[in-house]
Amino acid sequence: MTSFTVLVHDAEEGGFWAEVPELPGCASQGESLDELERNVIEAINACLEARSAEGVPLPAIRKWELPFPGTATPA
């Protein structure tokens, strides 16, 4: 199984966005963390399909990380 690092950020306008450093340009967004997770998996699949179609090799991948933003209440 291939795994990727997913960096999750709070979006300024609300919700979240995520980027996949091993796949430049692969990013997604969601209003909730559950939606973001679904969307980023879909984005990863689309990025992998595009790389495959273009003959671009996969990067060396070591692990999956899904860091979630803290749950602290904003001041």
Image: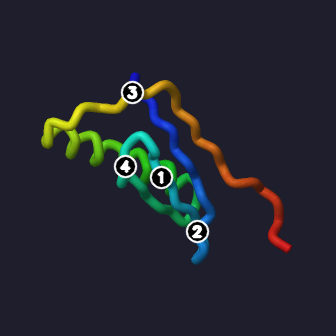
Which residue is identified by label 3? Answer: 60
What is the crowding at mark 3: few (fewer than 14 residues within 10 Å), some, or many (at least 20)? few
Relative placement, left or right, of 21 versus 67 is: left
Which residue is identified by label 1? Answer: 19
Q: Amino acid at mark 3?
A: Ala
Q: Amino acid at mark 2?
A: Ala
Query: x, y (%) of residue 43?
Result: 36, 50
**Element class at badge 4:** loop
Relative placement, left or right, of 7 versus 52 is: right
Which labelled disc corresponds to residue 11?
2
Question: Is the Cβ of the residue at disc 4 closer than 8 Å to that at disc 2?
Answer: no
- Check the image and report above or below for 9 versus 5: below
Q: Amino acid at mark 4?
A: Pro
Quadrant of the snapshot with the N terminus: top left
Real-space CA distance between mark 4 and mark 2, rounded to the nearest whole angstrom = 19 Å
Which residue is identified by label 4? Answer: 24
Say whether disc 4 or disc 3 marks the residue closer to the N-terminus: 4
Q: Nearer the viewer, mark 4 or mark 1?
A: 4
